[in-house]
Each structure stands twice: as structure tokens, then as C-alpha cells.
């Protein structure tokens, strides 16, 4: 196994551990809000979060991706490194402060576009925008310097933990959506400050006496098309929720936002595996090691499939039980929407390495147009389907867009870069996952006649154990086994496969 795969595996391991903690805490946060305050308040929270996320995407101008692309390339040139960071901070923070002032002035107008009492909580949520924008930039700085641990401390642990604690206090004392908004802002502020201190002390100081060498034109040429792609990507991510909020009561927004975040768990594995892909491949590109880039691209795509496909199959078969386990029985109304959205997010997860390859090769304009096409498809589909089919219509609109975001990048990279994203081990592991999931379904449904959460949990643990044993010893190659040995050694387990 090469040092480059070791770097990706190590970074993915830290990122994966951090994101598991983050997702667990964020699920506890959503669980507290959803169960403690009800679907209506949870729907209002989801709408506010959607709007804040969209505005944050607008104010960073795609610069986090530019940082990940250009910092590793100029890592030995401290003047350029400082120039990249300083320019990105100035532009993004100025934009976020302007957006904050304008939105506070017109927040009532925005709130009136949606059903429910959104006015006061939205004003509070908006305060978090500059801090969220700052965090996005500095997360990319930590990735560029391959310091995933710093991101994990601040964004994966502290940020959701403060949210969980504040939500618990709010529910315990019988407070409401406004207090929840204040807790959200507090977590964004604390996490941003910690991330800044950690990077300032351990990685790179923007207050150093090093003179900044700016690359404004090159950064903007790279980031502005990507900015539109990111913006439309957030539109695609949140437009279903926003259109639901326009046509339907906040209860249905709350139900739908139990389905979507659960389906988005399928993005954890690819997010971890591609977290250091661009910085590592950027170094290889500077050395003109094209063959090795192609090998790593295929390997990362295989890992994503190996780990994601069995989870996806279980989501399809046991959608009601998954939602009941995580959010409670009232949210099982969204089980069909959950199954539909899971199809889209699995497909999208398989395109993550291809999207990073486009970013590496500076194909940001192509990336932009793909995202615009998918987003427009999502908007049109949701506007047509939501008034008729409700949350199922929103799910279908999302799936249409996500399938486009899967198919077009894979085809484009396959044609332009001659990179094959499929392999025989992927086919074998897919058949294995389907057969094992069918056995679990037969045992739970036919033999026991009813699928309950207490019954399903031990069956799924057995399913996971059998799948992993067969994958490791019969399907995985030498490099996969070395990666697993490395990952286990990081947590103190000395096993050689």
C-alpha cells in the first residue's frame, strides 16, 4: 500500500470517527427536538436550518474547495498560503456580514413566504451565518494541511455537543423554538472560535509576519463556477424542504426531515473517504503521476460501494423500523419517502470520487452546469409533485436530481479521463449484501411474522458480521486488507488479515 493511500486512510479514519460522533450527537439533537417539541416545531427548525445553510453557501463563493485545491499545491510557499487564506477570509466574511444585515432587515418578508410562525426564530438563526461561513473556510484549511483531527474536535464534537446540551435544557424547562435558535447560534460561535484557535496555534497563523502573496484572479476563476455549483447544490439539498414549507403545514416538513437526514447517512462513508482525496491527488498531479491517480480513484470508489451498499439495502427493506428506532413511531408516516430518497443518496454517494476528480482537473464550469441542471430538475419536479403527492412528491423530486448528479459526473470522468469506476469485487460484494439482506428479511418477516426493532437489531448485527468476514477474506484485495489493518491498529487492535 502506498503512502498516498495510507494518508487517505488515516485522514478518512479520523474524519469517519469524527463524523460518526457528529452524526450520533446530531441525531440525538434532532431526536430531542422532534420528540420533545413535536413535528410542528421540528418543521420550523428544519425550515430555518435550510435557509441558513443556503445563505452560508452563497457567502463562501466556493472558496473552501479552492483552498483544498491550491493550498496543497503551494504548501511550501508560505507567502502564497497566507495569501490564499487571507483573501478567502476577507471576501467570505464581508459577504456574510452584508447578507446578515440585509436578511435581518427583510426577515419578515422571507418568513411570510412559508406556513407557520417563522419570523422571530429566523431572525435569531440568521446570526449564525458569519460563524458558519468562517468554519467552512477553516475546515478546508485543516483538510489542506491534512489535520483532520482539528476539524473533528471543533466541528464534529463540540458543535453538535453544545446543540445537544442546549436542546436538552430547552425541552426540560419547557422552552420553545426561539430558545432553540439561541442554542444553535451559541454552538456555531463556540465551534468557530475553537477551530480558529486550534489552526492558529498548530497549523498556520494568519497573524504571522509573512507577507501575503495573493492569487485573486486564479482563485476566483476556480471558485466562482464552483460557487454556483455549491449554491445550486444547496438548493438541491434544501429546495424540497422549502417547497414543502410553502405548500404544506410544518408538521409535514418535520416528517420529511426525519426521512432525509436518515437517508443522508449514506454520505458519511464517501465524505470520510474523499476528505483528503483532492489534497493528496493534487500532490500526485504536481508530480505527473497520472497512473497512480487512476488507481486511487478506482480504489476509493470500491471502498465506498463495499461499505455503503449493504446499508442502502437495509434502508430499503426496513424503512419503517429505521425511522421508528431513530425518531419514534409518529415519523413512520415518512417511510415511503425515506425509501425513495435513500435510492437517490446511495447513487449520489457513488459519484463523490468522480466529482472530486473534476475538481482536481479544474473542470469547475462543467461541475457547475451539472449541478445547475440537477437543481432545476429538482425545483420543477418538486413544484409539480409536492402539491399533489406531498412528502412523496418531494422525495421523487430529490431522487430525479440526485440520479443526474450520479450519472453525469461518472460518464464525464470515464470519457475524458479514461477512468473506470466499476470492478468485479463490487459486483461480488453487491450480490453478497442482497442475499444476506434477503435472508434477514425472510427470518424476521416469515418466521417471526412481524418485524420489531428489538428483533431487528441482533439480526442486523449478525448480517453485518457475516458480510464483513466474507468481504475481508473472500472479496477484498491486498490493499484493502492493509488499509483495514492500519485502521484497526489506530484503535489498538492488533489483527493481521
Image (tube, rainbow, N blue to C red):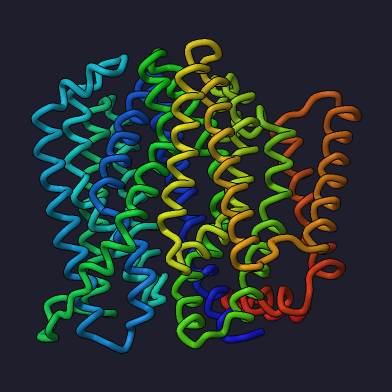
Residue 172 quadrant: top left
Closer to us: 315 or 58: 58
Residue at x 66% of width, y 75% of height = 295
Residue 336 quadrant: top right
Tell me if I can see residue 392 in this picture.
yes
Residue 477, percent across and down?
78, 74
Residue 468, percent across and down?
77, 61
Closer to us: 73 or 131: 73
Residue 118, percent across and down?
25, 22
Closer to us: 91 or 477: 91
Q: Residue furthest right?
A: 447
Q: Residue furthest front?
A: 416
Q: Residue furthest top?
A: 388
Q: Is residue 433 above or below residue 73?
A: above
Residue at x 57% of width, y 61% of height = 353
Q: Is residue 368 above or below residue 248?
A: below
Tell me if I can see residue 466 in this picture.
no
Q: Is residue 397 left or right of residue 56?
A: right
Q: Quadrant of the C terminus?
A: bottom right
Closer to us: 25 or 171: 25
Residue at x 41% of width, y 30% of height = 239
Residue 116, percent across and down?
30, 15
Q: How many marks?
A: 0
Residue at x 44% of width, y 74% of height = 279
Q: Quadrant of the N terminus?
A: bottom right
Amino acid at each position: 500500500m502506498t503512502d498516498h493511500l495510507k494518508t487517505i486512510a488515516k485522514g478518512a479514519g479520523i474524519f469517519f470517527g469524527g463524523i460518526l460522533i457528529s452524526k450520533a450527537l446530531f441525531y440525538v439533537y434532532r431526536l430531542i427536538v422532534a420528540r420533545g417539541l413535536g413535528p410542528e416545531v421540528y418543521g420550523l427548525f428544519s425550515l430555518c436550518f435550510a435557509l441558513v445553510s443556503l445563505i452560508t453557501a452563497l457567502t463562501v463563493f466556493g472558496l473552501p474547495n479552492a483552498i483544498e485545491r491550491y493550498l496543497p499545491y503551494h504548501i511550501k510557499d508560505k507567502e502564497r498560503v497566507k495569501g490564499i487564506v487571507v483573501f478567502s477570509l476577507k471576501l467570505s466574511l464581508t459577504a456574510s456580514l452584508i447578507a446578515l444585515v440585509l436578511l435581518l432587515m427583510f426577515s419578515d418578508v422571507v418568513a411570510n413566504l412559508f406556513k407557520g410562525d417563522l419570523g422571530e426564530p429566523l431572525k435569531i438563526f440568521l446570526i449564525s451565518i458569519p460563524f458558519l461561513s468562517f468554519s467552512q473556510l477553516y475546515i478546508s484549511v485543516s483538510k489542506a494541511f491534512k489535520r483532520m483531527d482539528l476539524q473533528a474536535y471543533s466541528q464534529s464534537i463540540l458543535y453538535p455537543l453544545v446543540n445537544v446540551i442546549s436542546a436538552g435544557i430547552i425541552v426540560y424547562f419547557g422552552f420553545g423554538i426561539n430558545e432553540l435558535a439561541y442554542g444553535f447560534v451559541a454552538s456555531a460561535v463556540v465551534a468557530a472560535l475553537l477551530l480558529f484557535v486550534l489552526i492558529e496555534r498548530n497549523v498556520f497563523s494568519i497573524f504571522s509576519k509573512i507577507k501575503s502573496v495573493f492569487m485573486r484572479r486564479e482563485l476566483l476563476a476556480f471558485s466562482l463556477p464552483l460557487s454556483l455549483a455549491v449554491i445550486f447544490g444547496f438548493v438541491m439539498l434544501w429546495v424540497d424542504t422549502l417547497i414543502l414549507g410553502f405548500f404544506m403545514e410544518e408538521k409535514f416538513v418535520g416528517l420529511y426531515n426525519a426521512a432525509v437526514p436518515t437517508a443522508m447517512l449514506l454520505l458519511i462513508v464517501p465524505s470520510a473517504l474523499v476528505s483528503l482525496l483532492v489534497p493528496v491527488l493534487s500532490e500526485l498531479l504536481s508530480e505527473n503521476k497520472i497512473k497512480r491517480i487512476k488507481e486511487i480513484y478506482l480504489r476509493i470508489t470500491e471502498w465506498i460501494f463495499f461499505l455503503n451498499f449493504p446499508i442502502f439495502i437495509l434502508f430499503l427493506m426496513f424503512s419503517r423500523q429505521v425511522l421508528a428506532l431513530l425518531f419514534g413511531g409518529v415519523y413512520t408516516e415518512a417511510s415511503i419517502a425515506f425509501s425513495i430518497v435513500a435510492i437517490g443518496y446511495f447513487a449520489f454517494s457513488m459519484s463523490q470520487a468522480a466529482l472530486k476528480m473534476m475538481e482536481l482537473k479544474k473542470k469547475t464550469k462543467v461541475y457547475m452546469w451539472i449541478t445547475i441542471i440537477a437543481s432545476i430538475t429538482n425545483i420543477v419536479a418538486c413544484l409539480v409533485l409536492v402539491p399533489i403527492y406531498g412528502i412523496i412528491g418531494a422525495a421523487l423530486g430529490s431522487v430525479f436530481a440526485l440520479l443526474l448528479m450520479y450519472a453525469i459526473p461518472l460518464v464525464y470522468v470515464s470519457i475524458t479521463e479514461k477512468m473506470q469506476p466499476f470492478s468485479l469485487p463490487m459486483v461480488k460484494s453487491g450480490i453478497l449484501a442482497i442475499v444476506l439482506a434477503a435472508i434477514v428479511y425472510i427470518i424476521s418477516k416469515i418466521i417471526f411474522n412481524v418485524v420489531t426493532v428489538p428483533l431487528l437489531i441482533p439480526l442486523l448485527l449478525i448480517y453485518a458480521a457475516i458480510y464483513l468476514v466474507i468481504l475481508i477474506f473472500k472479496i477484498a484485495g491486498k490493499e484493502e486488507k492493509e488499509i483495514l489493518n492500519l485502521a484497526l491498529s489506530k484503535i489498538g487492535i492488533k489483527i493481521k488479515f
